[in-house]
Image: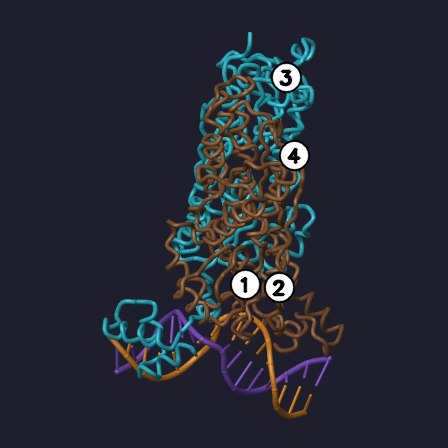
Chain colours: A cyan, B brown, C purple, D orange
Amino acid sequence: MGIQEIATVTGLSKSTVSRALRGMENVAETTIDEVRRVADELGYVPSSAAAGLATGRQRAVGVVVPVIDRWFYVKALGGVDAELRRAGYDLVLYNLGGPGGDRDRAFRRSMLRHRVDALVLLSLVLDATERAELELTRHPMIVIGGPAPGLRNIGVDDRAVTRIAVDHLCGLGHRRVAYVGGQDEAGMNVAVPHLRRDGFVDAMRAAGHAVPDRWLLDGRFSFAGGLAAGNALFGGHAGAGAGAGAGAGARLDRPTAVVCASDEMALGVLLAAAQAGLSVPADVSVIGIDGHEYGATVGLTTVAQDPEAQGRAAARAVLAEVEGGAAVAIAAAPAHLVVRGTTGPPPG
Amino acid sequence: MGIQEIATVTGLSKSTVSRALRGMENVAETTIDEVRRVADELGYVPSSAAAGLATGRQRAVGVVVPVIDRWFYVKALGGVDAELRRAGYDLVLYNLGGPGGDRDRAFRRSMLRHRVDALVLLSLVLDATERAELELTRHPMIVIGGPAPGLRNIGVDDRAVTRIAVDHLCGLGHRRVAYVGGQDEAGMNVAVPHLRRDGFVDAMRAAGHAVPDRWLLDGRFSFAGGLAAGNALFGGHAGAGAGAGAGAGARLDRPTAVVCASDEMALGVLLAAAQAGLSVPADVSVIGIDGHEYGATVGLTTVAQDPEAQGRAAARAVLAEVEGGAAVAIAAAPAHLVVRGTTGPPPG
DNA sequence: GTGAAAGCGCTAACAG
DNA sequence: CTGTTAGCGCTTTCAC
């Protein structure tokens, strides 16, 4: 059941069989065919462990995610996977399992076992100990999404994305705009929420508009969180009625637009607006960040990024290093405004 | 950098070091401590390839998905992952990449390399060749979601889930109910859509209600598809107005309820209803299948299943086999009605 | 409780 | 173009 068997059957040596199986040059066409045929007949299944031991290369790269069930991670994972598959590498998934899943054990038990040739970290910040341990493996590493001290990273400019959103809104004439962002409890890079928020605040200031604190909301980067934030903004449920909106008092204190740090939250805000009997964008404009498919189908204006492309780029980068190339610099991932139906001039 | 180094440093033999590192019995406490200490100092990183070669066990299981970016797969993957992590196994992800990503190469290049000790197939049907090739590896295998000829499987009773939905609706007095299901282009188990549809049709027939063909729609198991189906059902966009609904003619031909084969489609149908100016559930009831988080936050009634639990159960099953146990029978995964706000008595 | 030796299945020089 | 010879780093009898 090994390479040896097929060597004896064909009367060749192990080395030749090995070379033939890998289709290397300097092997007769006929030999190759013969070997392949016999291998098939015998039901030969190669052992990556043996190959890995001999070469020191596992032909696999690890992807570390804080949690899996989030749009960005799933998309980025898909991108990494696509590129790895093209290169014939396997992908081993290390899921930290959120705040509850003890990272420590995950770290030591698995990632540090030379099972992979490189690591792609999704939107992760490591503490000093973790970084030190990973360094031990001497593997190429890169992080996607969010800056990571001491590591190469690829991702959008998180301050710029909210600025783009603000600029779009201000260009339409808005001056009273709220922001829904906030920490992601599930282990996302802590820097991202801050940067996006800062980008928003700075851009508003630059445009000469004040932003009261009560318009800086926490949407926990989730749909439900966005809905809650929207309710806070629009005065909660307004019943089933589709009337012309809340009272005059509420109206005065209502922003004419809201920028959300993710499309999922924007979707929640949209729902809150609908429940409050508000028309979008007539009464209020809403803009998100990401380029989520759901956003596209409901016509959400957004600042789109391409996590899949980021995943592909990250995979290519580490693969290049693994195959001997030097670490190359990586350009910031692009993000661009996609104007759809949820933004328009302010009312009045 | 190997076990040898730490052997020479401690003055022990490789065997003892190996035993100590794995905390086996018949090793002096003091020796264990000493070895661990030196290992740490030296920054020792074990090689899973070497261990795998020696033992024949990789301590890893493969998970094969048709595509990743779908609610069910992500959740199930999370469940499998959680259980594997608990057991100290790694998870290698094999993404077939939908209809476009050539399965063949994926199959031969990776899955067949003894890199894993078992395989969990997510909602997949294999053709005869694929099954034969996988058999070669003699690995325990199980499929989640949808029946798979010749393989053990775990999942809900796909005919039952739609029946439960129909029973709920009929219990409320509905007789005119439509169905949104359809093929999933992205490589899902082909049996699932058929079974759910059959379950719907049969249940309706059993309740004594006819279902015209035009009320059996294709929503491609996606949000966008559900929206399109909903538009077809409710007469397309009714403009921005929030009026009392479409004309009398349309009204007569409108179902009073619609069951959707997935929550994502149900969400689309809900949006279509809103756009058509219909109130839910006053004008039309909507029920989905799955238990998607978004559904929960918009108050969608659904027949919930727990893909994460299914993933955990599947992982436990293959792990048990890997560790020597016999293949145990697996009970059908539970699905239960969750009544929320989108279903009610029919109008009139 | 510890050591010596054999090997897991493959690849990689080095010869021919 | 093919064969020979050593390992890769660990586990595992079998002795002691």
- Disc marking residue B330: 2
Q: Position of residue A46 (x, y in %)?
A: 42, 70
- The residue type indicated by label 3 comes to Val
- The residue type indicated by label 1 comes to Ile
Q: Dot 1 lies on which element?
A: strand
- Disc marking residue A183: 4
- Do marks 1 and 4 both belong to one polypeptide chain? no
Judge the density around disc 3: few (<14), some (14-19), many (≥20) Cα neighbours within 10 Å: some
Q: CA distance from mark 4 to mark 3?
A: 19 Å
- Residue B110, by quadrant, is bottom left
- The residue type indicated by label 4 comes to Gln
Of labels 4 and 2, the one closer to you:
2
Q: CA distance from mark 1 to mark 3?
A: 55 Å
Say whether marks 4 and 2 touch (CB < 8 Å). Answer: no
Q: Position of residue A23 (x, y in %)?
A: 30, 67
Chain that bears disc 4: A
Of labels 3 and 2, the one closer to you:
2
- Residue D12, by quadrant, is bottom right
Q: Position of residue B285 (x, y in %)?
A: 59, 33
Q: Is residue B237 placed above or below A36 in the rendered structure?
A: above
Say whether marks 4 and 3 touch (CB < 8 Å). Answer: no
Judge the density around disc 4: few (<14), some (14-19), many (≥20) Cα neighbours within 10 Å: some
First-in-chain label (1 vs 2): 1
- Do marks 3 and 2 both belong to one polypeptide chain? no
Q: CA distance from mark 3 to mark 2?
A: 57 Å
- Disc marking residue A211: 3
Of labels 1 and 2, the one closer to you:
2
Q: Dot 2 lies on which element?
A: loop
* Residue that numbered label 1 is attached to: B142
